[in-house]
């Protein structure tokens, strides 16, 4: 299974995830990133510029798999229709 690293960028500061997590695919990494951000915002609030932060998910090679702005984790994706019909 591939390993994904969840690095947090707040402004110019990057807080690296040295261990990462083995996950089945990028879709699962997206789900984990969203849950991590929601939990962090729940426990820490918007203090210290967290709403301006971005979770940068990278793979074993150091390539960026996704960038997840903390503000996007506030939206409930279950309310968003999958299709536009």
Image (cartoon, grey):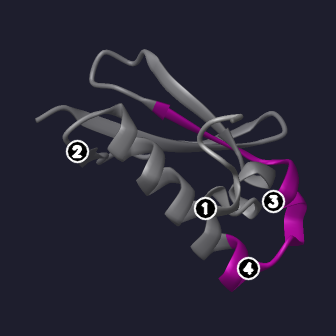
Callouts 3 and 4 close, C-beta under 8 Å: yes
Callouts 4 and 1 close, C-beta under 8 Å: no
Mark 4 or mark 1, earlier in chain: 4
Q: Which residue is drawn at 70% across and 52% down?
A: 80
> Disc 3 on helix, strand or loop?
helix
The residue identified by callout 4 is 44
Q: Residue at x 66, y 48 (%)?
A: 81
Front in this rendered view, residue 51 or 73: 73
Q: Which of marks 2 and 4 is in front?
A: 2
> Disc 4 on helix, strand or loop?
helix
> Disc 2 on helix, strand or loop?
loop
The residue identified by callout 2 is 23
- C-alpha span from label 3 to label 1: 23 Å
For residue 45, above or below residue 52: below
Q: Residue 50 carries which label?
A: 3
Q: Which residue is drawn at 69% across and 61% down?
A: 79
* Crowd around label 3: few <14 · some 14–19 · many ≥20 (10 Å): many
Question: Is residue 53 found left or right of 5 in the rendered image?
Answer: right
- C-alpha span from label 4 to label 1: 24 Å
Q: Which mark is residue 67?
A: none
Name the quarter where the N terminus is drawn: top left
- C-alpha span from label 3 to label 4: 8 Å
Residue 8 part of the magenta segment: no
For residue 17, above or below residue 58: below
* Crowd around label 4: few <14 · some 14–19 · many ≥20 (10 Å): few
The residue identified by callout 1 is 78
User: The magenta stretch spans which residues?
Assistant: 41-57
- C-alpha span from label 2 to label 3: 25 Å
Question: Is residue 11 found left or right of 69 in the rendered image?
Answer: right
Front in this rendered view, residue 52 or 10: 52
Mark 2 or mark 1, earlier in chain: 2
Mark 3 or mark 4, earlier in chain: 4
């Amino acid at each position: 299974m591939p390993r994904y690293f969840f690095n947090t960028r707040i402004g110019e500061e990057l807080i690296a995830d040295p261990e990462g997590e083995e996950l089945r695919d990028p879709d699962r990494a997206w789900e984990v990133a969203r849950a991590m951000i929601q939990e962090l915002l729940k426990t820490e609030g918007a203090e210290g510029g967290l709403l301006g932060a971005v979770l940068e998910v990278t793979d074993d090679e150091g390539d960026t798999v996704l960038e997840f702005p903390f503000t996007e984790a506030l939206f409930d994706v279950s309310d968003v229709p999958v299709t536009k019909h």
